[in-house]
Amino acid sequence: MLSVRARGVGIGIILLLLIGMPFGATRGASAANIVVDAESGTVLAADAPNHLWYPASLTKLMTVYVALAEIEAGRLRFEDSISVTRHAAAQHPVKFGLRAGQIITVRDAINAAIVASANDATVALAERIAGSEQAFATRMTGMATELGMVRTVFQNVSGLPADGQVTTARDMAILAQAFLRNFPQHYELFNQRSVTIGGRSRGTVNSILGAYEGADGMKTGFTCASGYNMVASARRDGRRLIAVVLGSRNGGARTLEMKRLLDLGFSGVAAPAIDLVALAEQPVEPGAGAPPTILAGSHCATPQLVGSSLIESPDELTGWAVALGNYRTRTKAQKALQEAQSKLGAAARGRPAILKQGANGLARYSVLFAGLEQSSARETCVTLSGKGGYCVTLSPKIIANRFAR
């Protein structure tokens, strides 16, 4: 049965009904999603796949794609040097911490863009190739057009908020498929769990890696306007799928939605419907799909109150962490997290997370800042302790042992 959004009922849906296409809807806690067979491009299921949305850091997928195209054309090498400009070093808020004048390699920049979603490294890469971020963004849009990403426009290379920078779940699936088709020799870049530049290391921000059997790439993204986005690919029993989730309400919901989509695709329950090329030709209701700000108000109004992800597996935690305590209810855990964020203010670092675990019917909620370097974890804890807060630093090994099931 065809399930559609109330505002999406129109000529496009009537057309689908007339041709009898068994297009599988995948209603979930997101604005749009899609799961496709990576080799054939056959859409297995989707919800609002042509709905315009802000890409956030999914933008970096195209940044890296253009860079790899330059490498394959012989105009760029992984070993080439990049001198980090003041503009690149000044990027925010997610950055690697590169200094103006620092010399890194193209490989460093690509790795930092993929693994750590580092805006400073991404801009430095773009400037090295095109001379300026704007010139490179124009090339990104041109490449999107070449690939058939018909509703995608790029305004910058990082994914930072820009009203005219939009994409769709269908277009992002096209881009993921292009990576697998055109650069299979470089796909392992998306399965890295950490990156180190100049003695400084960052863990991956991609929560699906290690959390889903067979998942081996690609990229996550978040801004307050876009919500939590993800493009992922997974392989099982010789079959590869691509899935896209746009606009989840938090990181935990995004991971769960991605797992559900991939499970659906691998289960064989979803009936093949249409391919990605034909999907672009579906009519879209005029004016529909303008990306709303779905995470407004206090949740995103203040930098230190960036929200948290309720997670149920320590596999979703990366790097070092600062533990703030264990609580019997999620409400108390959330309150403790917000109090710590308020104490830290601009000094807050890492990914706010609430890890839910339980035994014998009793749930416990552990509050953490995760995804940190060792030095950042210690600095955060020292700052918080100095303001009367409780905390303890945890290494990746301790996290794995402490929260093992």
Image: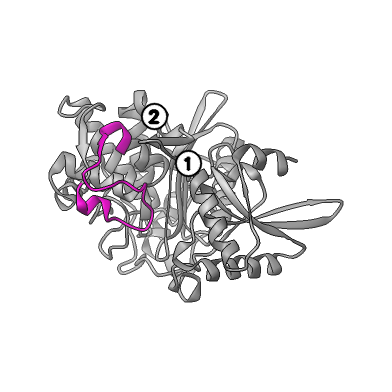
Please tell me whether mark 1 or mark 2 is closer to you in this view. Answer: 1
Residue lying farthest right?
360
Magenta-colored stretch includes residue 176 = no
Residue lying farthest front?
386
Does residue 266 sit above or below 156 in this rendering? above
Q: Residues within 10 Å of mark 2 (few under 14, many from 20)?
A: some
Does residue 38 sit above or below 17 in this rendering? above
Q: Say whether disc 1 or disc 2 marks the residue closer to the N-terminus.
A: 2
Does residue 244 sit above or below 109 in this rendering? below
Q: Position of residue 7 (x, y in %)?
A: 44, 69
Reading the image, the residue beneath label 2 is 187
Left or right of 397? Residue 15 is left
Left or right of 235? Residue 187 is left
Q: Position of residue 338 (x, y in %)?
A: 58, 69
Identity of the residue drawn at 35% across and 27% down: 186
Alpha-carbon distance for marks 1 and 2? 15 Å
The quadrant where residue 109 appears: top left
Q: Front-most of 78 and 90?
A: 90
Q: Residues within 10 Å of mark 1 (few under 14, many from 20)?
A: many
Asked if one can make out residue 1 in the rendered structure from this viewpoint, the answer is: no
Q: Position of residue 57 (x, y in %)?
A: 37, 51
Q: Amino acid at mark 2?
A: Tyr
Q: Say which element carries label 2.
A: helix
Tally the numbered discs.
Answer: 2
Reading the image, the residue beneath label 1 is 204
* Magenta region: 85-109
* On-image quarter of the N terminus: bottom right
The quadrant where residue 181 appears: top left
Left or right of 127? Residue 363 is right
